[in-house]
Amino acid sequence: MTQSSGLRDINEFVSASPDDLMATAEELGIELPNEPPPEAWFAPEEGLSWISQLQRHLTANPNAVGDADAVLADLAEYREVLDTAKANDVRWHFAVDF
């Protein structure tokens, strides 16, 4: 959905520490071709802007996903977290738990 609508892909906000990436790769028996990139952190405003764009897009195009109401509810929760991060001047990123 994000590519077809011109929105930033959620995966652009995913990051982890190089040590965590290397440990996970070792656990999974994967050899990394290069040194992992440094951990990326984002300003809350980047996430809040992205969420606003997604909310507008889904409100205008509810058939863009299987359950727009559930996705909008999740986005509202993300907004609360990022509002708190902004109020406390804390940077953020999404993480994947293996």
Image (cartoon, rainbow, N blue to C red):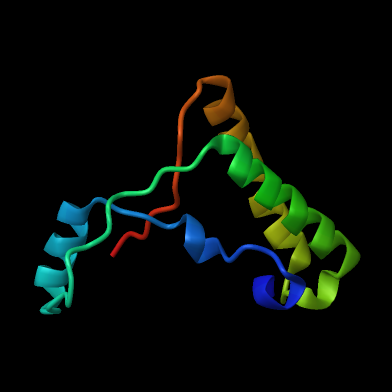
Tell me which residue sits at (81%, 62%) in the image.
Answer: 57
**Which corner quadrant of the image does residue 56 belong to?**
bottom right
Q: Is residue 48 left or right of residue 21?
A: right
Rendered-image quadrant of the C terminus: bottom left
**Which corner quadrant of the image does residue 67 belong to?**
bottom right
Q: Is residue 78 visible?
A: no
In percent of width and height, residue 39 lies at 31, 49
Relative vertical location of residue 51 with respect to residue 64 in this rendering, above or below: above
Number of callouts in the render? 0
In percent of width and height, residue 4 lies at 72, 78
Relative vertical location of residue 9 with respect to residue 56 in this rendering, above or below: below
In percent of width and height, residue 50 lies at 67, 51
Tell me which residue sits at (36%, 60%) in the image.
Answer: 96
Relative vertical location of residue 9 with respect to residue 45 in this rendering, above or below: below
Relative vertical location of residue 75 with respect to residue 25 in this rendering, above or below: above
Q: Is residue 53 left or right of residue 23?
A: right
Q: Is residue 96 visible?
A: yes
In percent of width and height, residue 86 lies at 57, 27
Tell me which residue sits at (73%, 58%) in the image.
Answer: 54
Q: Nearer the viewer, residue 67 or 89?
A: 89
Report the residue that reaches farthest toward the top. Answer: 88
Rendered-image quadrant of the N terminus: bottom right
Tell me which residue sits at (60%, 45%) in the image.
Answer: 47
Q: Nearer the viewer, residue 38 or 26?
A: 38
